Structure formats: C-alpha cells, structure tokens
Amino acid sequence: MRVSLFITCYNDTLFPETGKSVVRVLERLGHTVEFRAGQTCCGQMHWNTGYLNEAVPILRHFVEVYRDAETIVVPSSSCVSMMRDHYLKAAESVGDMRLAADVQALLPRIYEFTEFLVKKLGVEDVGATYPHKVTFHTSCHSERSLHLGDIPIRLLKQVRGLQLLKLENPQECCGFGGTFSIKNADVSSAMLADKVRTVLNTGAEVCTAVDNSCLMHLYGSLHRQRTFVRTAHIAEILASTAGDRA
C-alpha cells in the first residue's frame, strides 16, 4: 500500500523523530511511504481560536495536496479530529459545495497512526522491542472524538520488553488544549499538576501518547521537577527494535 504521511506542522517543527518513526514502522510492515512536500497545516489552530475564514483556505489546500492519495496517515489524533469533525462544516459554512464534496470523498482515507495499524491493516504486533516501564496518557481528542478506545494499548502490549503501567483517571485532560493553556494558564497548570502526579505514581520511566502536544505539556512539568521521566510518542516506541539504544 502507498501511504501518504501528513506529519502535522507541530511534529514537523518540534518533533521530527515522530515522523521518522512512523516511516520506519510502515516500511517494516512492507508499505511504501510518501511525503508530499506541499503539505502545511490542518487549520486546527485557526479554527479553534475563531479565525474561521482563515481556516478554510488551509483545508482547501490540504484537499488539493491529498486529493489523489490512496491513504493518509497522521500521527496526531487532534489533527484527525479537526478533519473529521470540522472540515465538512467549514466548507459548508462558506457555501463551497464542491469543497464539501471533495472533503467527503477524502475523509474515509484519513487515519490516525495507531488506528491505521489496527483497524485498516489489522496489525497489533509491529515487531517492536522497548525494554522500559511505560505508562500511556489518553489524549482528549483520541478518546472523545476519534474513540480510539484500547487501540494504542493493544499495540503497546505487543511490544517486547515493555512493562505497561496503568495510569489512574485516564479520562482526565492534561490541561494543554492548545491556546487553552495560554488563555487559562492557572487552570491549565492545576490540571497538569494532577496529571503529572498520576504519571509519577505509576513509577514509569516513559510516558507515551498519540499526541505530541500533550506530551510536550507533560514533559515541561516532568523536566522542571527533575523527575527524569521521559516522554515519547507511541510511534517512537513502536519503531524501536532490539538493536536500538534506549
């Protein structure tokens, strides 16, 4: 299968290892991965902060870039959530019925990374080895929008050497929420403190998730407290093999 990787602007700028890891996993499974250089942003930042008119040209560009793609894989549940929950209404809001039709045609080919592995490919064991104690943070978009359920957990349970430690209150938000953490800093910090406490209570060496936005927020606190707990996108864990250094 030919897979088009939409890396997301967030990962491309701050967490390039995530995209590289997605490629390693998919190529290990025998698929061809392409990176379309014309890709930019999904438009979520603009849409969520009220710049609705500015978001529409971004989604229109996304459609043009991926119009003929066989499958689009995205290592971010929040970006896929933007596409599934808002692209159609955004197109309809400006009365562009042709764009709306294009969106409807494209959406069935868009997958979050772990969803693609399990639901589309039917794979849970990707041949990974990661000898560490790991806990999994459930991001809000993966739970409430994409309804991934236990898909990421099923993948982690098949990783050799990995000890998966349960995180208490997995339904609770980490407090990031994009600009929420800026506009409501005190509330965000309180939510973050609660989430970090549950991470530390597990005794894990690594906290993982399907969204680097959450992991960046968590790592900021973990690092400031000098806890030595690391964060890693789930793609990095699934890409690891016995020959890799920890």
Image: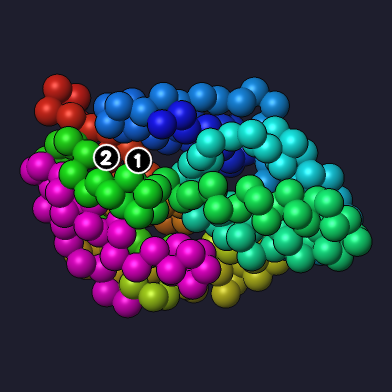
Residue 200's x, y, as percent?
A: 25, 62
- Residue 171: name its quadrant: bottom left
- Identify the residue at horizontal 16%, vertical 54% (top origin): 157
Marker disc for residue 238: 2
- Which residue occupies the foreground of this view, 75 or 193? 75
Q: How many marks?
A: 2
Residue 123's x, y, as percent?
A: 25, 46
Number of residues whose C-alpha sits closer than 10 Å to that of mark 1, classed few (under 14), some (14–19) or many (20 or more)? many
Check disc 2 and report its element: helix, strand or loop.
helix
Query: Image height check: is 42 above or below 142?
Result: above
- Identify the residue at horizontal 73%, vertical 49% (top origin): 102
Q: In the rendered view of the protein, which quadrant contains the C terminus? A: top left
Q: In the rendered view of the protein, which quadrant contains the N terminus? A: top left
Query: Image height check: is 126 above or below 88?
Result: above
- Which residue occupies the foreground of this view, 60 or 194? 60
- Which residue occupies the foreground of this view, 232 or 21? 21
Check disc 1 and report its element: helix, strand or loop.
helix
Say whether marks 2 and 1 touch (CB < 8 Å): yes
Number of residues whose C-alpha sits closer than 10 Å to that of mark 2, classed few (under 14), some (14–19) or many (20 or more)? many
Q: Amino acid at mark 2?
A: Leu
The residue furthest left is 161
Q: Is residue 151 magenta?
A: yes
- Residue 241: name its quadrant: top left
Q: Is residue 111 magenta?
A: no
- Residue 125: name its quadrant: top left
Q: Is residue 28 left or right of residue 188?
A: left
State which region is magenta.
140-169
Residue 159's x, y, as percent?
A: 16, 45
Q: Is residue 19 left or right of residue 110?
A: left
- Identify the residue at horizontal 26%, vertical 68% (top origin): 167
What residue is shown with label 1? 235
